[in-house]
Image (cartoon, grey):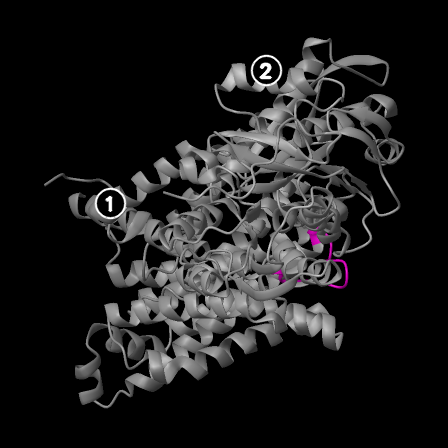
Amino acid sequence: MLVSNHEPTPSSFELAKMSRLSAYLFLPACLVALAVSAPAMSDYALEIGFRLLLLITLAEAWNLLAGYGGLVSLGTASFVGIGAYALTGLMNKVGVPFYLAIPAAGMAAALLALTVSRAVFRLRGLYFTVGTLALAEALRMFMVNYSGFGGASGLFLSVDPPGLLDLFWIALAIFAVTSLAMTAATSSRFSILLRAVRDDEDAAAQIGVRPFRIKLIAFLVASFLMGMAGALQGLKVGAVEPYGMFGIQWTVNVLSIVIIGGQGLRAGPIVGALFVVLLSELLADYPALHLAITGLILIVVIRFAPKGLVGLFQRRQRALGGTQ
Amino acid sequence: MNPIYKNTLKALSISMLVGAAVSAMAADEIVIGASIPLSGPLAGFGLYQKWGYETAVNDLNKAGGITVDGKKVTVKLVVRDDKTDPNVTASNTETLISRDKAVAMLGSCTPALVNAGALVAERRKVPLVAGCDPLQAFKSVRKWQYAWVMFFDETELATAPFRMMSDLNLQTNKKVVVLADNGPDGTLVGGKIWPETAKAGGYTVVQNTSFPTDSQQFTSMVAEAKSNGADVVLVDAIPPQAIAMRKQMASAGYTPKILVMEKGAEPEFFAQATGKLANGVLVGGYWDPSFPYPGAADLAKRFESETKQTQSQHIADSHAAAQVLLDAIAAAGTTDREKINAAIAKTNKSYVIGPVKFDSFNTSAIPVTVMQWQNGKAVVVWPKDRANGKLLFPLPESK
């Protein structure tokens, strides 16, 4: 073993405590700094920032379900789509301002989650995954074929969308709500119950945990956040149509981000989203290469770093700590 | 600070520096952007568009570039793949404007994609010229100020087969089957214009079926059409569906006298994928190298010699869209987007697709023809003054 002159290594409990503390302080400070400095940012930085915040929100929500709750859902697109359509409908038909329409769209997505929860929670493991994928596809097909919501042509927002700076601020606000929700959900008694259900649902039930209720809360929170993210995307594009808003690409993007960043880890979605967005920007001129590299990275990460980049980093830190 | 956040910040800073370096623009060039479908179901259109846009820009650069603020500059065309996804078109358009500093944009293809990019361009007050979006679908979105489209009008296109049958006095049992996707133009053409025109012309629509734009299974609707015994079948579908439907019609042994496949039968790969089954299939057209427009014949020859593929109408509309934009930048003599937009509005010139002059809806209509696949080639069969081939009637039996 190496002999070191460094300070004694803190225990994993202390590390976790420090990490939580810095997250509590660092993240709000970053958000405030970003909000204040946004007017000085270039349009490009605002656009990338917006995209990052939107994807992080979606990835955080998915991470709550899959990473913490073991509910590997492939139904992200349903909630994104419902959020986008709800916002467009509320703004066009009822004249609701966007700052009310966004949370209302989140509620619409949560309502959908509540409606289908009994059916999808009857399924476990891979069956749940396939069930949520079927839900997303069924909804997409319904929206394509039902002319009441514009059919395949979709709907256009009747008012002009806000400017890029305003959109960035809204995305920041939604991200702040997401962070709060995630912090509450991952550092409370609920988090322990959720992980107990994830690790062994039957055993958890035996000791008094009510799995349905716990899973439902996680599902509702995640769907609400995804619905708000979808509403934000609908507001930005100014047009919603079923192929884009209910498209499988939302599900795939979010899944890739969390797998690359680190499933079940608080920093996973942030690191994953940064990695994916920056890679796509750097390789924007080489779309084929971008696809190939992303695929290769996913394979390598799944094979060698099942806890993603953040997990790999933590493992390295622990290994370094152990050798000292 | 948590090492994870610290490293994340480092990565972010490095990437932003790299991004800034990548987006740094040479002083002697201006950038125009294009987000087009190079992958996904509409990739067949995007490849032609890319060639048309690039050819117009390369020709201009070879001729010395463009004068902006009294100085000759070259034009850099930055093309991005929108993967046939309107969300990607919107995001590409945003980054082309903000990162690549595009002074103006060239549009994508089909209403969903063109409109998604145009809405961003409109919000950012950046001129966008497109050549692949049917005019009524474009006009129905909003009153455009910065987006401009030159393409055919759906009513013109949809009524063309009926006008052709009347002109050429084609004998049918006057029974019509309409099979149209439920996309914006499919709904308009299949749901409204074809039934109305059929009725006005004394035809009876015995079946009108709408389907989602990602269906691949058409056997039941084809079987129904066969049992209805219609001599005229009008289809509005994207290429993969048109190919599947043509093959399924052959499998069912159904051969109407007239088969029109709008959109889907347009690109060459329809003829390649269906082989002999393409023979006799009709599709609305708006351009052929034989048309008496400046550079038409030469453009097709260049495409075929450079790519070793058969030309498509989309090389012409995309080439013309790029030329209209480049001419407007030259006329404005500046990169000021408002002035470029004002110059586009004043366009009044003949291009490879014919005369272009925008109306108050920011659209310029291209006259419509009817084309027919004959031995792997698309020939113009109507109107008579444009025809360069004789109509194959009735549709040959599929063997």
Give the residue displayed 32% in from the left and 47% down from the top.
Answer: A309
Are the residues flagged by discs 2 and 1 from a single subunit? no
Q: Rounded to the nearest whole Å, what is the CA distance between mark 2 and mark 1?
A: 58 Å
Judge from the rendering whether residue A69 lies leftward or rightward of residue B144; answer left or right: left
Label 2 neighbourhood size at 10 Å, few (<14), some (14-19), many (20+)?
few
Q: Which mark is residue B302?
A: 2
Q: Return the residue nearer the eye: A206 or A34.
A: A206
Q: Is residue B238 above or below residue A67?
A: above
SS majority, magenta: loop
What residue sits right under mark 1 in the picture? A316
* Amino acid type at mark 1: Arg
Q: Which quadrant holds the C terminus of chain B?
A: top left
Chain bearing mark 2: B
Residue A100 pos. (x, y %): 68, 74
Which stretch is magenta? A153-165
Callout 2 amino acid? Arg
